Amino acid sequence: MSKSKSGDSSGLPFEAPIREIEDRIAELVELSASTRLDISSEIEALRARLEGQVESTYSDLSAWDRVTVARHPRRPVTSDYITNMLDDFFELHGDKNFGDDRALVTGLATIDGRKFMLVAHRKGRNTAERLECNFGCAHPEGYRKALRKMKLAEKMGIPIVTLINTPGAYPGIAAEERGQAMAIAENILGMFDIAVPIVCVVIGEGGSGGALGIGVGDRVLMLEYAYYSVISPEGCAAILWKDGERSPDAAEALKLTAESLLELGIVDEAIEEPTGGAHRNPLQATAALKQALIRHLDELGQIPLPDLLEQRYQKFRKISHIEGRFPTVADAVKS
């Protein structure tokens, strides 16, 4: 994608009308700075028009559009939430078996005096960080590290917060040799029995078993423009139609948006993002997530542990009620 005049090369395809206005504003601001012309009224008019265009554009996004927003390169990632949301964070490393997987970060955290264990996918912000973190695709040692730290939280009697942002677990040969599938399965099973409150939040991509490996909780939340799915739209399109161009069709069939998953009862809350997505106002998005976490942690803290564990089990046991409510992916294959 070509770089816009405003210097941002990360715009999404459907944001073209927005970028046109932003580029015009940038031109006028530059003109005003380099001349004595008073064009403040024109700039303010364009900014008002920009606000309306952003609101209009984001009011009717397709499922595929929302996937692209979830992947936006300027969308806040775990490191941003650690910096801007937490009062304190002390990272804990390693699985005491193979190594320390950088794709999953774990550590002791505090937020407004509330202590908890943070377990989160780490994607990185720039190219070097993304390579170091394997683009958020964890190896089995990452999931083993996560489970060890969650069991430590149980011993300490503090709740657990997980931030999910991964296209999926790493599918390489080495990961399979070290027990990728088993590590994820052990995490899913183990999280049902951990006797402290667990809040899971999908902050960007929630892909397949890579997401589920830290996704079993008493509350499962999603940011408004995140997605949560058994497979990526591209992977689904490749399997069903052998055609990557049908990824938008797959996204619609998968019902992977916060709105659809809330209606299906798979997630408990969709956290509203700033107009135009979290990438347009990261601090506002951080504040919204912080408020939601505090509210759910406080609510869960009032529930007796035996009741909490039973409710957690029943929550996932009853997800099967979605059958028959919507067209399935299999139905989409016939179209």
Image: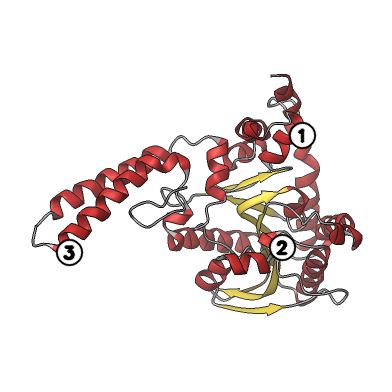
At a point 58% along the width and 48% down the height, the residue shown is 226
Q: Position of residue 261 (x, y in %)?
A: 64, 40
Q: Nearer the viewer, mark 3 or mark 2?
A: 3
Nearer the N terminus, badge 3 or badge 2? 3
Q: Residue at x 47, y 47 (%)?
A: 1
- Residue name at image x 32 percent, y 44 percent: 20
Mark 3 → mark 2, Cα distance in angstroms: 54 Å
Q: Residues within 10 Å of mark 2 (few under 14, many from 20)?
A: many
The CA span between labels 3 and 1 is 54 Å
Residue that sits furthest to the top in the current view: 335
- Amino acid found under the numbered disc labelled 2: Pro
Q: Position of residue 295 (x, y in %)?
A: 56, 60
**Is the residue under label 2 in contact with that under label 3 (CB below 8 Å)?**
no
Circle 3 sits in a helix, a strand or a loop, which is it? helix
Amino acid type of the residue tagged 3 in the rendering: Ala
Q: Is residue 34 above or below residue 321?
A: below
Can you tell which mark lies on residue 33?
3
Is 234 or 288 nearer to us in this picture?
234
Q: Helix, strand, or loop for circle 2?
A: loop
* Amino acid identity at mark 1: Ile
Quarter occupied by residue 191: bottom right
- Residue hosting label 1: 239
> Is 179 located above or below residue 150 in the figure?
above
Q: Answer yes or no: do the residues labelled 2 and 1 have beta carbons within 8 Å?
A: no
